[in-house]
Amino acid sequence: MNLTYSHWLIADDRLSLSTNTKYKDNLLAYFKHSILYNGGLLISDSQLFDNINFRLLLQNDDDVKELIKHKLLAVAKRDSTADLVEFKNSRKDLLDPNIHKSNSIKSIYNNNNDISFVQENCKIIEYKISDISEEYTKKTLELFRQKTSETDDIFLKELKDKLEEKYKKEKKLLRSYIHYDLVNNLPEEKRDKYREIVQKLGTEYYVRGLSSILNIPAVYAKNQIDLFVKNSKKDEILDAKTFEYTLNLSASRYVEGLKVLTADDIIELIESDEYKMYSTISSRFDGTLKNSEDIKNIVYEYQRAIDEKIVERYYELEDRNDTSKVDFRTILSTTGYTVSFSSIIANPVLYNDVSIAMGITSLATNIILDTLPDKKQPNYSRQIDELKYELKDKVFIESKVKIDSNCQKQVVYDKLI
């Protein structure tokens, strides 16, 4: 498997998706979805240590471990430490007490078995902290210079000059200085007006620094991109050659759907002809309308291949030869639907708390299946479409496939937990 890696910023350990254990399954769905559309993912050493939900998956989910064995995860490790376990154990005093205060969370964090597993099975990419610091300083100064070159705002230029002076004196800039010292020292009458722009300029390469020095794309949540300040002239040029396509509402966007995919399923999909076509045409994106339409069609075909695998996997969970009952109660309780099957056709019936209180029960709390749809049948596509709606739940993944001016494909997630 010829892999490239994208910095998986969905693993940001400051997000509730990472720290609130009730969202563990959601993080798993994002992990699978990101691999399906990006290939290999990379996280930093600190994201690995402090992302409690990912640590839980590493410790308990065999599919996650199998995906890691196939090198679908890389870890960026600072070169100042011998290995990941040693580094994790050396920084216990740096833990956020608000995140790691409970005994259960501490036990997850203190377990070294998962970190040892990652050390032995992941691709490890070393980086220098000094490179991150230099990149942050250089790129942040560039952003301030670009922004002030586009405006006649005298006060903003004065702030940029303060940064230049700070850099000349200390040969580096710290995000803490920009976010707190620079902002808090603003005149009170100007603080509200300039706080957001100053903090955005000081945040972008705090978020993008690792992917920038490694020269790899990143997988963002939209609210992370919203922290960046657009440079109107530069972005006008880039937007002319940027492909963006909102993925159709389908089984591959539902947490319940993605949960049923095994590691073997995911590997099969990213080795499929559909994925290869998606990767190939992405690398040749030229910004033309025809090229964009070709990519949309290929993304649709790949997404459909994922949907078919999800539906196939879901309905194979029980032995169909025995016409065993497949328990759908968990899904039904989250969707607001009850379902009756005739042959293989779904008939959703809405229900609500009032109907339940009146004693109106579902047509079927379990679904008996005789067979999966036959790909050779003319109504196969319709049957797949009907089946996949049973995989809905209240949480679904809102995402866009995006290809930038450097022909790097990525998925931008519009909304996280």
Image (cartoon, helix red, strand yellow):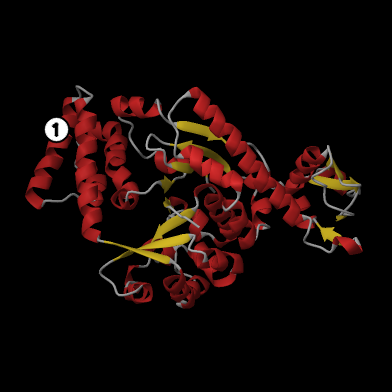
The residue lying at 20 percent from left, 47 percent from top is: 137
Residue 51's x, y, as percent? Answer: 46, 62
Q: As drawn, is 81 to the left or to the right of 98?
A: left
Q: Residues within 10 Å of mark 1 (few under 14, many from 20)?
A: few
Tell me if residue 97 comes above or below residue 333 in the rendering.
below
Q: As drawn, is 195 to the left or to the right of 74?
A: left
Tell me if residue 247 comes above or below residue 217 in the rendering.
above
Q: Nearer the viewer, residue 32 or 163?
A: 32
Q: Residue furthest left?
A: 169
Q: What is the number of callouts on the image?
A: 1
Residue 300's x, y, as percent? Answer: 62, 37
Q: Nearer the viewer, residue 256 or 164?
A: 256
The residue lying at 57 percent from left, 41 percent from top is: 398
Q: Nearer the viewer, residue 358 or 58?
A: 58
Residue 155's x, y, as percent? Answer: 17, 29
In what element is the residue under mark 1? Answer: helix
The residue lying at 21 percent from left, 58 percent from top is: 130
Residue 242 visible in the snapshot: yes
Q: As drawn, is 154 to the left or to the right of 98?
A: left
Residue 194's x, y, as percent? Answer: 27, 33
Judging by the rendered image, the residue that carries numbered circle 1 is 158
Residue 98 visible in the snapshot: no
Tell me if residue 26 comes above or below residue 88 in the rendering.
above
Going by the numbered disc 1, the residue's amino acid type is Glu
Tell me if residue 207 comes above or below residue 159 in the rendering.
below
